[in-house]
Image (cartoon, rainbow, N blue to C red):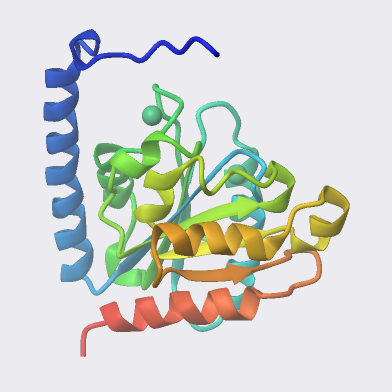
Amino acid sequence: MIPTIQASPEETYDIELEQSLLQANAKLAAENRAQLDHHGVTAIDFMGAIGSGKTTLITRLVEKFKDQLNLAVFNGDATTVDDVNLIASQGVPTVQLATVNGCHLDANLVGKALLKTDLKKVDLILIENIGNLICPAEFPLGSRARVVVVSVTEGPYMVKKHPHMFLGADLVVINKTDLAEVMGVKVADLARDAHTLKPDLKVVPTSCKTGAGLDEVAAALLAVTKSGVHA
Ligand code: MG
Ligand code: ZN
């Protein structure tokens, strides 16, 4: 018998603080969304662990979109400027969101980034969240859709061990499929775990190396973007 210590609710002494924090964030997220909708701008945020390939996926999407849409990219990163520099080198307006907590973006920071963005000149904002599969799920940002990126290199249990993240997703990208065989991870098993949590979830296997699946991801995000454009 393996001893287990189960935390009781009484032990979470900051629970009231957390509740008001989440409520405040939800209110700011709604304000961000109202501001985006007012300008006919769509925001889509990308969540996933460090190393899942969020930045590389965004660079591929920027390549696909930049001739047809006016883009901006916000990069959440508490420690380096590598990601934002890479995106900026593609000639897209970018904002670095350096969080203090280091573990999730919040609607307050995204609101500040919106103030630095000329919303009249933007159609689509891609937001890279902090590399973390836990708390970003609890902090909506005001985006129209949330994408979760999970890669086969993270092993076979990433989906089932992060249910909140996948329950809150509108699209799941299973990335680095070119490495699935060598990792001994079955893409179909990760997709099945996602569908067990949320049967109607759209799941797209991708490889940014071979380009597989990227057109399908782009089409899905374009459909979300078009749905947000004013008639
Ligand atoms: Mg990154
Ligand atoms: Zn966090």
User: Which of the two residues, 205 or 27, is positioned nearer the viewer here?
Assistant: 205
User: Which of the two residues, 4 or 99, is positioned nearer the viewer here?
Assistant: 4
* Relative side of 42 to 67, left or right: left
* Relative side of 96 to 109, left or right: right
Ligand 2 positioned in quadrant: top left
Q: Can you give x and y, in whole percent of width and height, for residue 3 in the image? A: 49, 9
Which residue: 12% across, 37% down? 23
Q: Can you give x and y, in whole percent of width and height, for residue 124 in the image? A: 39, 69
**Is the residue 7 above or below the residue 54 in the image?**
above
Q: Can you give x and y, in whole percent of width and height, for residue 84 in the image? A: 57, 45
Quadrant location of the C terminus in the rendered image: bottom left
Q: Residue furthest bottom?
A: 231
Which residue: 19% across, 69% down? 37
Task: Specify the quadrant of the image occupied by residue 19.
Answer: top left
* Relative side of 207 to 224, left or right: right
Which residue: 18% across, 10% down? 10
Q: Residue furthest front?
A: 1
Note whether residue 58 is visible. Answer: no
Task: Specify the quadrant of the image occupied by residue 35.
Answer: bottom left
Q: Can you give x and y, in whole percent of width and height, for residue 111 in the image? A: 25, 45
